Amino acid sequence: MGQLNPIAVFLVALIALGVLGNNPTITISAAVLLLIQQTWLAKYLPLVDKYALQWGIILLTIGVLSPLVSGKTKLPNQFADFVNVKMLVSITVGVFVAWIAGRGIPLMGEQPVLVTGLLIGTILGVAFLGGVPVGPLIAAGILSLFIGKI
């Protein structure tokens, strides 16, 4: 009998966590990666590894902008609507989070071993706390603040 592939076992565990945590995002993501890894599609894993984060950010941005484009959400009509406290705080938080995420990208590239911990924490947060898996990038940025890595 052949040896078990530890990555395949990990992906199966993620699928189980996704099902148990009622989180289809984790379930589908792990199942797609398992399918890719275990089939002839494995030759495309380097492309997935290189571009999937960018594709995901693009899809997330499309999802965030679509209510505006569909007319479900309206742009403020007047300048005064932009300068209320809630709007200014939301802009400030958006700038801060984007800056934090920007710090996370080099950290993930320079210290890839930390990515495993960030992924496990994100998976646990998604599976059991109703989180959303955009966490690794933000988590890496926050981690960079703690460990002083830009």
Image (cartoon, rainbow, N blue to C red):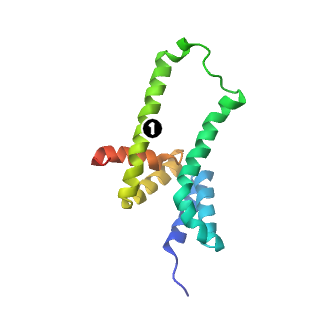
Crowd band around label 1 with a 10 angstrom C-alpha radius: few (<14), some (14–19), many (20+): some
* Disc 1: which residue: 98
On the image, the x and y values in percent for residue 105 come to: 42, 50
Side of 73 relative to 139 (left or right) = right
Report the residue at 53% width, 61% height from top.
49
Most distant residue in the bottom direction: 1
Q: Disc count in the image? A: 1
Q: Which SS class for mark 1?
A: helix
**Quarter of the figure with residue 16:** bottom right
On the image, the x and y values in percent for residue 88 come to: 46, 21
On the image, the x and y values in percent for residue 145 come to: 31, 43
Report the residue at 42% width, 54% height from top.
118
On the image, the x and y values in percent for residue 54 come to: 54, 50
Whether residue 93 is visible to the viewer of this picture, yes or no, is yes
Where 58 sits versus 73, above or below?
below
Quadrant position of the N terminus in the picture: bottom right
Side of 74 relative to 53 (left or right) = right
Q: Three-letter amino acid code at disc 1?
A: Ala
Where 77 sits versus 107, above or below?
above
Most distant residue in the left direction: 148
Most distant residue in the right direction: 70
Report the residue at 59% width, 64% height from top.
33
Side of 14 relative to 41 (left or right) = left
Where 36 sits versus 105, above or below?
below
Whether residue 22 is visible to the viewer of this picture, yes or no, is no
Where 6 sits versus 123, above or below?
below
Side of 42 relative to 104 (left or right) = right
Report the residue at 52% width, 78% height from top.
4
